[in-house]
Image (cartoon, grey):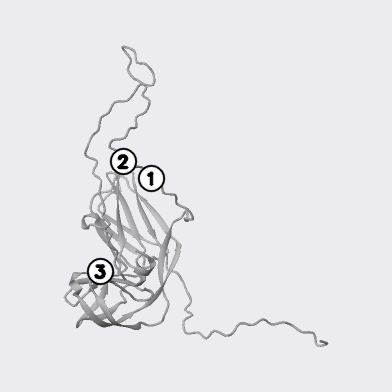
Amino acid sequence: LSAKQWYNGEKSQTIIRDTIVADTGKYYASANLKESAQVGDYSVVADSVYTQLVPSAQTETPMVNINAAGDSVALVKTASGALNKTFPNITVNTVQGLYIGSSVMPKSVEFNLFGSAITDVGGELKNSTGTSIGTINYQNGAIAWNANAGTGTTDLTVTFMPAAAVTAPVESMLIYVNQENNGFNWIKNLVPLPSPGSLQFSYLVQNQVYTLRDNGAGQLRGSDSSFGSGSVDYETGTMAVTVGELADVGSAILLTWSNMITAQERSGLTINKAYIEIPVNDSI
């Protein structure tokens, strides 16, 4: 999307799909010898053990100006109370979204849509029956409607807690997996305390990485329910995860999160005119 399209709340038509590779095939090939082989040799020296399996293109992506420790976004409240913002005559459909105007705190968005009360449940916007009518991106403050939202134009008053998206280096922890501690359930106390929506839990199964992410409501979910699930308590830092399969012995489970950032609210303060004091000698 262009900046103008994103600002107008338009929805991208690009579909991003996750692919899980299953190493179930065996491949055989021939290679040229680097040295001539003689009858009775137990080993031979090949030019290379690597070859291209299928025609494919290789691309390199330079990554610059990246923190070696990794960066994550923490959401910090920017007001002591919730705000009410009215959007007159908006269009509701699956193509056009709605930009609230700032980042928002998790679980703080509420509004009425076509006579139905909508609340935020971990990034999912649900009505009173629990049906999802769309999603809210906390960092961007963007609402994306789905088919259950209906279509039409309406005046919308949204109640939400505004936030600032602060980028900071992530905290990390490794849990080494061995025969003694391997299991389906993992419990850890995270210090410093994680900020809502920042915790990621990654583990290895048959050399494939599976990641569970905090949805901002204290629930850890993967892109597929088979990856497992878990929870995190922002007050105590306690994390409990049940993985979908046993992690590979000899691997390590990686936890990353942003800590609770302390910020001072400056909204509503009067800003005085800037001036410079110049001391003047009495004799002048």
**Badge 1 is on which residue?**
59
Q: Residue at (23%, 69%) from the top-left corner?
A: 94
What kind of element bears circle 3? loop
> Tag 1: Cα neighbours inside 10 Å, few (<14), some, or many (≥20)?
few
Q: Is residue 235 visible?
A: no
Indicate which disc, 2 or 3, sits on the residue closer to the N terminus: 2
Residue 128 as seen in the image, left or right of residue 209: left
User: Image quadrant of residue 143?
Assistant: bottom left
Secondary element at tag 2: loop
Q: Is residue 153 above or below residue 243?
A: below
User: In which quadrant of the rendered image does the N terminus lie?
Assistant: bottom left
Q: Are marks 1 and 2 in contact (CB under 8 Å)?
A: no
> Residue tagged by mark 3?
95
Relative vertical location of residue 46 with respect to residue 40 in this rendering, above or below: below
Question: Residue 19's spot in the image, x, y percent?
Answer: 25, 50
| Front residue of this view, candidates 55 and 106 | 55
The three-letter code of the residue at mark 3 reads Val
Residue 90: % across, % down: 27, 79
| Residue picked out by circle 2 | 56
- Amino acid of disc 1: Thr
Displayed quadrant of residue 9: bottom left
For this orientation, the residue located farthest to the top is 39
Residue 140 to residue 184: above or below: below
